[in-house]
Each structure stands twice: as C-alpha cells, then as structure tokens.
Image (cartoon, helix red, strand yellow):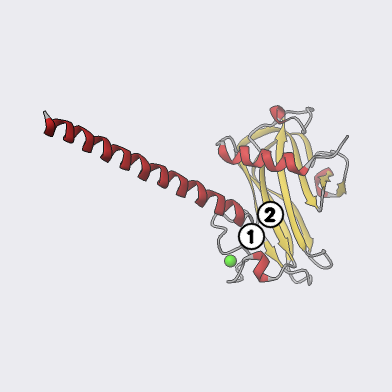
Amino acid sequence: MNLFKLKSVAVAIGLSALSNLALADISTSKAVLGNDGSERLAASADFTAAVEGDLYIAIGVEEKLLFLANGGNSLTERISPFAANQVYIGSIPLFNFSTAGIPAGRYPVYKIVTRTGTDPLNFTNWVGGLTSVNFMVGLPVAHSGDFDGDGFADSDLDQDGYYMMTLIKMGFMMMTMIKMVIMMMIMIKMVGVIQTEVWYQ
Ligand SMILES: [Ca+2]
C-alpha cells in the first residue's frame, strides 16, 4: 500500500490547522486559474525557520495522490520525496506548470517534512505539520468563488485556496460568540436570582 488516503489527509489538515506547529507554509500567487494555457500553476514552500529532513510534495488528482519527486522532475504514485535529507530555509520554488490542457477541477497540493528516512504516512514522523494549498483550474466563477478575478476565491482571506476553510473558521467564531452570549445570559440570570434572594431576605 503506497497511496495516501485522501480522507486521512483531510483529517490531518484539520488537525494541522488547529496546531501552531507549522514552521513552513506552501503558497501561490494564484490559486484560481483558467486552463487555456495563459497562466502558470506555481507554488513555493516558505520556511520561516530552518527545517531538516525529507520534503514531500503531493498533488491530489481525483482520488489519487501523486508525488512530485526528484526536485519536481517527476510525478509518481509511489511515495517519493521532493528532496531528501536536506535543511530547508526561505522560499523554495516547487513547480511551475502551464495550465494548458489540465482537466477542470480542484487540485490540492500538500507539503510535509519528515525526519530523514522516516515514513511520511505516519504523522508522528512529521516535522512542523502539514500545510496545503488548493488550486482550482478551469472552473466557472460560480464554483471557484473568484468573482473579482484576483486569483483567489473572494472569501479566501488567507489565500490558501480553501474558501471552505474560511467558512469553517467563521463557523467556529460564530459558535464562540453564541457560547459567550449564552454564558452572559446565564450570568445575568444568576445575578438576577441573587438579587431576588437578597430582595426577599
Ligand atoms: Ca478573488
């Protein structure tokens, strides 16, 4: 078994988003692209601090994960590192493809660094967490959400290509606010009870 299960990756991203372990991000200047070949699908890994180990870059294509291996020179279903046993610092270009002929769809790209020589499928081997950017290629604007044409869904405030994540974050914020309001209502009611008790004494 040498393939990631996309569902477990999605769970890992969720967990990763909750942690502050990420020392490196994966970023792009354009996550929403056409597929007429006039734009480039490109990303870089940005390390804010030196990280040592094996760097894996995987692209989700339909239900499969393809590994960008050998410094970006090959794309394979086999688990293969982009770079092995190195120290990463600063901005590292990962790929720069023409979008010509890429089938319309969503293409999440995942980045992890593992301790040198360890299994990338085991998250306990990860150094600095898992980060991801989600490309949307050749999709109508109603699906990409990029109505102003700046290369990111208009609700994608952190420019990682995941407008749904932004919605989830908004959901979390709303839940927190609702909880606070309920707490305040309970406190007001408690104060009211105390005042009533004092009144009757
Ligand atoms: Ca936009």
Label 2 amino acid? Asn
Of residues 175 and 91, the one nearer the viewer is: 175
The local crowd at label 2, few if under 14, some if 14 to 19, many if 20 or more residues have their Cα within 10 Å, is: many
Left or right: 178 in relation to 66: left
Q: Quadrant of ligand 1?
A: bottom right
Where residue 169 appears, as percent x and y from the top left, is 53, 49
Identify the element where label 2 is drawn: strand
Q: Is residue 183 above or below residue 74?
A: above
Identify the element where label 1 is drawn: loop
The local crowd at label 1, few if under 14, some if 14 to 19, many if 20 or more residues have their Cα within 10 Å, is: some
Where residue 5 appears, as percent x and y from the top left, is 79, 40
The quarter in which the C terminus is drawn is top left
Q: Earlier in the sequence, mark 1 or mark 2?
A: 1
Q: Is residue 189 above or below residue 167?
A: above
Which residue is the site of mark 1? Answer: 29
Left or right: 156 in relation to 183: right
Q: Report if the beta carbon of the residue with label 2 is closer than 8 angstroms to ligand 1.
A: no
**Residue at left 67%, top 47%?**
132
- Mark 1–mark 2 distance (CA, rounded to whole Å): 12 Å
Which residue is the site of mark 2? Answer: 134
Label 1 amino acid? Ser
Q: Is residue 138 above or below residue 165?
A: below
Where residue 184 appears, as percent x and y from the top left, is 31, 41
Q: Is residue 79 above or below residue 165?
A: above
